[in-house]
Structure formats: C-alpha cells, structure tokens
Amino acid sequence: MAHMHMQHDESGDLPVDIKEVKNPKYPVGTTVELLTDHMSDMLHAKAIIDGVYDTTVYSVTYNDTNSNDQIADHKWVVDGEISYKGSVDVGDQVTILAKHMDGMQGATATIERITTEPVHMIDYYSSDHGRWIKNHQ
C-alpha cells in the first residue's frame, strides 16, 4: 500500500557504515523515471539520483507510533536503520531506527522481505506536494 499523507524525512541521513556502489547502473546525477509506486506520487515521476548504496534492504510492517495505524510492507529500510540481535530473517521482530516518515522511529516492526539490491537516494518531483522531495531512499 502506498503511503499517503505522510511527512517525508528529507535530511539525507544515512547509516554510518553504508557503502557506495562503485560503477552503479545509474550514477549520481542521472535523471530517471520512477517505475515504483510505494509512495502515492512516485509512479512515472521524474527523479535525480543522489547516491547509490550497497546494503541489505528490508520491507517492514509496523504500527505508526503516533496514530497506531498499521503501515504494511513499508519499502524500504536498510541495514543500520533497524536494531536486532544476531541475525534477522523474514518474520522476525526488529526496532526501526530510521525516521523516513513521521511515526516510524522506535516502532517495533516485522520483517516482510529481505533483499540485497542497490539502494538509490533520489530527489523526485511529487505531484501530490507540487514540489521536489529531497533525499528519498
């Protein structure tokens, strides 16, 4: 489900140990068309690549710490933005450290999916907000 009416964190903060991809398919500065819809205003939006990172990526379900609404299958948080002991697998409970959206940081989440694809930090034009959203991960 796309996240509507949520406030983006545009700080660009990244986990300390995240590594940049060498020779990414879409280098920093590349203009692209988004083919994802995990935010209501993303599908076919124009975007500019700000960074490309090599890390483990997680989709999570959690309850918003402000409203207690369930946010299902939130895409994406990266390694270093969740807290867990030992290893983590699909179905495990973790604590979200990321603050991509208001009500996310500190929430207990269930891991829905794990992948190791490159993560792109982008600026994209939001038709919902009528402006550029900065540093979306």
Image (cartoon, rainbow, N blue to C red):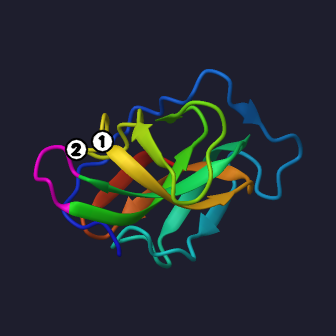
Question: Within 10 Å of the Cα at label 2, are there few (<14), some (14-19), or many (20+) other Cα atoms?
Answer: some
Can you give x and y, in whole percent of width and height, for residue 85 in the image?
57, 30
Q: Which residue is mark 2?
A: 103
Q: Name the residue at 57% across, 32% down.
A: 80
Residue 2 position by quadrant: bottom left
Can you give x and y, in whole percent of width and height, for residue 34 in the image?
56, 71
Q: Which SS class for mark 2?
A: loop
- The residue closer to the viewer here, 97 or 21, is 97
- The residue closer to the viewer here, 78 or 83, is 83
Q: Quadrant of the N terminus?
A: bottom left
Q: Which residues are magenta?
A: 64-69
Of the residues shown, which amino acid type is indicated by label 2?
Answer: Gly
Mark 1 and mark 2 in contact (Cβ < 8 Å)? yes
**Alpha carbons under labels 2 and 1: distance apart:** 8 Å
Q: Which residue is mark 1?
A: 107
Task: Please state if 31 lies on the left or on the right of 106 as rendered.
Answer: right
Of the residues shown, which amino acid type is indicated by label 1?
Answer: Ala
Residue 117 position by quadrant: bottom right
Can you give x and y, in whole percent of width and height, for residue 10 in the image?
37, 39
Task: Please state if 79 lies on the left or on the right of 102 as rendered.
Answer: right
